Image (cartoon, grey):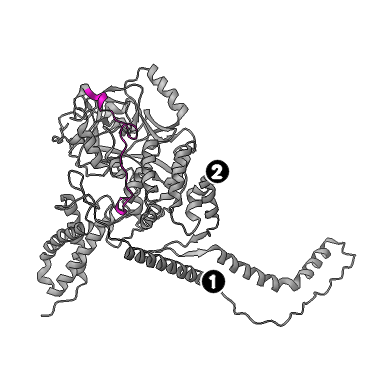
Amino acid sequence: MGQDGATRAMPSLMSHLPDATTEALSTFEELPDCTYETSRLGRTRGQDDPACECTMEHGPAYACTDESGCINRLTQVECLRDVCRCGEHCANQRFQRHAYAHVDIIKTPEKGFGIRACSDIERDEFVFEYIGEIITHDTFMRRMAQYKEEHLVHFYFMMLQRDEYIDATKRGGRARFINHSCNPNCYVSKWHVGRHVRMGIFAKRAIRAGEELSFNYNADRYGNDPQPCYCGEPNCVGTIGGRTQTDVVTMDDRFILALDIADQMAELRASLPRGRHQQQQRAKILNEDFHPILHAIAEPECARVMTAVRDATTNRRMIELLLTRIAMTDDMHVQKMLVKMHGFVIMAQVLEAWSDDAPLMHLALECLTKWPLRARDKLVDSGVDELVHQMQDDPLAQQLHESWSSLPSTFRIARREGQEQAEEVDWAARRRAQATQVSAQEETNAGTEELRRSLLAYREHDDSEAVRAPRPKIKKEEPREARPSISLDEIIRRANEQNEAAQKEQEAKKEQEAREEQATSPPKKRSRLEPDIPTLERHLHKLVGTLVVKQMSKVKSQLDREHFKRHAKELTQVLCDKEKRNPKAWPPRLADGQVGLVELPEDKRKKMKVFAHDYIKKIMQTRPPMPR
């Protein structure tokens, strides 16, 4: 289904057009990576722990993929080569490896050069990085005027961050040739790679070999004047340029899902007039002509919301709505998930970009008051602590800064392979242990201090001058009670045990209060529109179980009944857990956007079959021989 509910026709193929790559590359200077006007441009505000929790437990095919639930990949952060535990098998280093799709350049009849897929491209597959010169706002304005004087027809500007732009007009990458469509097959997304922000183009749906690639310029590109649109889609808005991500007609589906307003948008779009001659009447701006009803965030939406905040940091209206959803969420587990999704790094980006907007900053502070913290590390690493400290005119900022000042600082011991959580050590305990060691050393050296000074004085005087070295005064110690010596490791271990016991006691208290509140409050009726997650889980388990039994039937003769049932049950549970951990796939949605599940998609079935095949192979290699 396309926008406005129109059924999308089969995509037209451009296989008949000749390859024009050589001609296209002669029109500009190709860059392998972005260049920066100054070293401060394109930088991320802070840096969270870059290590994800992925391991090689299920084989290389699931190393840092969507199916593995990689926390970095879900929040659009690339794993770093020297940090990721999956090493060369990590599938979340596509920008760094230039892992682009197989495409070529063609020359279209009306739109100039374009990009064509040479092979099939799967949904959400990385297509290209948008490469160019990263410039400031002042340079952007000068170049806009310059290119207009030079009568350049095509424009290649894209906003990277607030007051920072990518200019691929004269120097850039091949992604500059991807044309516009009002119903595109690609989308643009912002990723953090190390300490830089980079723009990637990804497949919005499955793309066939021979299709021309496209994305929506109205949401992502900038130019001098609106130009006629030749995309030919039923929902075509008529022009390229002059619209934004908050125009209801052209708003990206990612933001619609992140705001959870799909039903409201469908109803509004259906009420708008149709036809090219009525385009001006169709323009409805979010939060001006259309005020959506927002709801608190549910757990499966966490990754979707945080990636939308990262992508929308240059768009005030969108940021305001997304922050409103975060602020109105009271579920502590959901707030913890938002923090885990690199929440403080993303919030630092918002605070820095909109530091001159007091109402938006206050809304961001309201979100921060709900985020649970046990230590100051994330605040310092992300830069949020410093940014909030600079906002002392806001009483809420003062309150936050005072409460954060009382938090301890900890350091994390690097995780080893297979270790689930890093140990946390109290810096105060470490300093106390070091102070004990220093004190003991000072007592040992106290008797020799006067002798050392005497020897220094002797060397400074003339050889003929006699200098008597005084005898060292030996301090007679008072008898005191012997104390057992405690090693640094023992102090750290005890501090960790005390912290863990206190945390467990606090969590148990909260659980008890929640049970008491639930027992006294009347049962809530399930909303008719609220998805029935338990029913979805049972149906998923049934569909996956059927697939697993069919796959395992190939080795049924080599397993006894009990082993067959046990392994089938284990494999079904593993696949279901993987599916539910992936926020992009769970909860599943039907073609009309509603939450629901009828059958497993074909691409999902193929991936599950590959995993099941490897799993069964391991079982057969380690199984005991069947008794005869």
Q: Which residue is mark 1?
A: 491
Give the residue drawn at x 21%, y 55%.
532
Q: Position of residue 513 (x, y in %)?
A: 39, 65
Residue range in magenta is 278-301
346 sits to left or right of 597: right
Q: Which residue is mark 2?
A: 390
Q: Position of residue 577 (x, y in %)?
A: 25, 60
Main SS of residues in magenta: loop
- Say if the magenta span includes residue 283: yes
Image height of 388 relative to 227, above or below: below
- Dividing the image into 4 quarters, which one contains the C terminus? bottom left
> What kind of residue is marked 1?
Ile
Give the residue drawn at x 44%, y 24%.
141
* Residue closer to the observer: 603 or 406: 406
Q: What is the secondary structure assignment of the residue under circle 2?
A: loop
Q: Quadrant of residue 511?
A: bottom left
* Residue closer to the observer: 7 or 141: 7
Q: What is the secondary structure assignment of the residue under circle 1?
A: helix
> What kind of residue is marked 2?
Gln
